[in-house]
Amino acid sequence: MTFLNPIKAIIFYLMVILGICFNLLFAITPAVPFIFLNRRFYLRWCSFALGYYLLMITCLLEDLLGIKIILTGDDLTNDKTRSIIVLNHRTRLDWLYAWTLQSRFQILSQLKIVMKAGLKSMPALGWACQHAGYLFLHRQWENDQERINNIIGYYKSCQSPLSLLIFPEGTNLTNETKIKSNNYASKQKTYNRIYEYCLHPHVTGFAYLVNAMRSNDIVDAIDDVTIGYEGQFPITELDLLKGRFPKVVHFHIKRYNINELPQDSEQIGDWLRKCWDEKENRLKEFYEKKQFDSPTKRLNNERMESTVRFQRRLALVICTLFILFWSYCIIAFVKIKFYVVLVCIFHWVMESYTNGVIDFVCQLDANYRRQQQQQQQPAIRQD
């Protein structure tokens, strides 16, 4: 670790914070009227705006912090198949590096992440993720089941391409969580061994999500992604701020067609446990050999890397100019200051009285679909 690393980390966090604030204020919030006019356009607008911000973040990760990305397994380049992405949760920052993976597959705009409900009310970042249709769960199954149904109905009615990233382990790997996970798993009938390199997956929510998305015809594949780190790596956000960057982040991708998965929920749970057994073996081998597969089988090629390098650097330039322009406007114009205050009040009101923008939009969409069904029923009876 060099003395410049903490400085780079400060610049990284500064750009992350400024970027999401200005993205929410001047790229995402202007789409709010379309919640009532055209929700499909609203979701695509917000998804693109947030996705372009994420592309800028990948530039900071790779070009500022110097993190190298290596891909092995199935090549999904330019394959924008609707999918559920399952990823092991090694650190609290895995989702950051996952953006570098999705940037190479050109699906940042269709990426959604299943997140803890507590992050939903986080100013700027949580609000922006709500607009972009991220799924927030409380870990209370009855409430979460309803939330999953509502947002899947919203996804279906918007007919937008979708890649939903989920961490089936529920939390990141630490000594404490590993002990708890192994103790809990040992009391289950399906228990077969202790895990050292990942946590035992939670299967109930995953099985329900798979069947719900499959029955609504909004998913085509399951992408089993394994992440591994070469060299030192940060576990928490504070570690990253101290200048501890991973030298290389490895991803191994294995795609399953949705039709390969069983229909029964218990069998889907068994399927996921089998995937995690394979993932445990894969990670054990990785940390012994420092690679998932031989260098000749890596998906990174010069054409892929040059394309994504140009795209992310262009995103950094555009986002930087965007921040500078609107910073000047905030300083120079009282009306813009007033607009910023109104945006903050709007999101505070939505959090306080409707449980957030995403819940409001999903409920509005559910009411619209219900009205459409009621209007169709009399017509069917008359026929």
Image: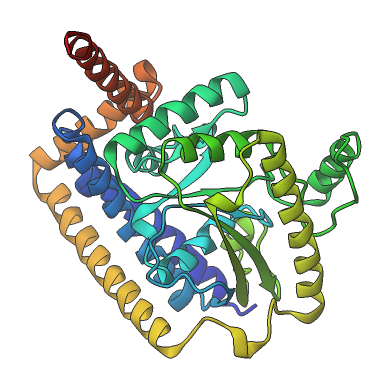
In this rendering, the answer to whether 50 lies above or below 305 is above
Please report the residue visible at 90 percent of the width from the left and 48 percent of the height from the top: 192
* Quarter of the figure that contains the C terminus: top left
Q: Is residue 308 left or right of residue 33?
A: right
For the point 24% across and 12% down, the residue is 377
> Is residue 253 shown above or below 181?
below
Residue 18 visible to an observer of this rendering: no
- Left or right: residue 343 compared with residue 153: left
Here the colouring is rainbow
The picture places residue 86, in percent across and down from the top left corner, at 59, 53
Location of residue 5 in the rendering, given as x and y in whole percent from the top left corner: 56, 74
Quick one: quadrant of the N terminus? bottom right
Q: Residue at x 32, y 22 (%)?
A: 366
Where residue 353 sits: x, y (%)? 35, 16
> 101 or 233: which is nearer to us?
101
In front here: 312 or 254?
254
Residue at image position (16%, 36%) is 339
